[in-house]
Image (cartoon, rainbow, N blue to C red):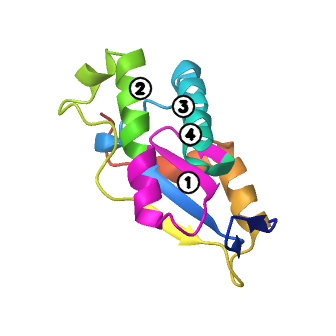
Amino acid sequence: MELKFASHCSYQIRYHMVMCLKYRKLLLRQNNYVDSLRIILEEIGERYWFAFDEIGTDGDHVHVFVGAAPKWSPSRIMQVVKSVSARQMFSEYPALRKQLWGGEYWSDGGYIGTVGEGTTESIVRKYIQEQGSEREKELYSQLKLFKF
């Protein structure tokens, strides 16, 4: 993790964020949706000066490893990412609105963790890269009660 500089400060801030699709629908198993979401997140990064270091998905949720300047609170970063990506996905794929009954792309809430002494950057990167692996799919399938 590198040290970044702004006009009046230097910082080294990274967050591990997890955002779930509404109703935990398994819509992110299709490559076109995943590729579009990656492109959208990269565009958001360019527009808002967020640094998306890793992006991973496991079908019904997305893990991102993102850095931002200290002026951005973690909840505001998640709000921007979720609102802009949802609008873009619905405009590119109008059929998604029918699959997500209420017309919302993301579930309310999410997970935000910081990278610090206990959780290192390499641990978070490896975890995100392993999303969708066979080991994760086996663990996830054991916890399912039913499929939508």
Q: Which residue is mark 3?
A: 40
Three-letter residue code for mark 1: Leu
Which residue extends farthest bottom?
Answer: 117
Q: Which residue is mark 1?
A: 139
Q: Are marks 1 and 4 in contact (CB under 8 Å)?
A: no
Q: Position of residue 39 (x, y in %)?
A: 60, 29
Q: Which residue is mark 2?
A: 89
- Whole-number angstrom distance, CA of label 3 to CA of label 4: 11 Å
- Whole-number angstrom distance, CA of label 2 to CA of label 1: 28 Å
Which residue extends farthest front?
Answer: 7
Identify the secondary structure beneath mark 3.
helix
Q: Which residues are magenta?
A: 55-81
Q: Residue at x 73, y 57 (%)?
A: 125
Three-letter residue code for mark 2: Met
- Check if residue 58 falls in the magenta segment: yes
Quadrant housing residue 91: top left
